[in-house]
Amino acid sequence: MRLALILVVATLFIPSFSAHADEVPAEIEYLLTTIGSSDCVFIRNGKRHDARDAEDHLRMKYRRGKRYAPTTEAFIGRLASKSSMSKKLYHIECPGAEPVPSGEWLSQRLAEYRVSQDDAQ
């Protein structure tokens, strides 16, 4: 009887664990949605991708590799800056600007986000 009670209680917590596992930290979510809503082009392995494709690709990389990204800086450096297959740097080209490495672009957006969060407090 006691074992049955333990199993019932344990199963009540399983949905919260799985839901928590899918959460994306606020800073990373901000970076992903900022890319996806931009008018920029994401250059990956020499091919141009629209902003929505860039967001989708980086979400997939985060989902698969979040254990390598315990911080937002690690996300940028380990997952969002270069191809894990070819090792080629990703670039972001926004209207009226030269392409820049995605790590630089994302780091700038992160700095702006953090300032806005500090100002809000």
Image (cartoon, rainbow, N blue to C red):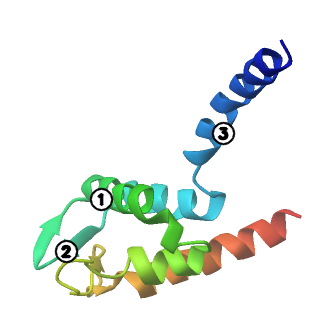
Q: Between tags 2 and 3, which lies in front?
A: 3
Q: Quadrant of the C terminus?
A: bottom right
Left or right relative to 90: residue 36: right
Mark 2 belongs to which amino acid? Answer: Arg
Q: Are marks 2 and 1 in contact (CB under 8 Å)?
A: yes
Residue depicted at 20% across the width and 77% down the height: 85
Q: Position of residue 107 (x, y in %)?
A: 52, 82
Indicate which disc, 2 or 1, sits on the residue closer to the N terminus: 2
Q: 79 or 49: nearer the eye? A: 79
Local SS, label 1: helix
Left or right relative to 38: residue 88: left
Local SS, label 2: strand
**Above or below, 96 relative to 11:** below
**Pointer 2 residue:** 44
Residue depicted at 62% across the width and 74% down the height: 71
Mark 1 belongs to which amino acid? Answer: His
**Pointer 1 residue:** 57
Indicate which disc, 2 or 3, sits on the residue closer to the N terminus: 3
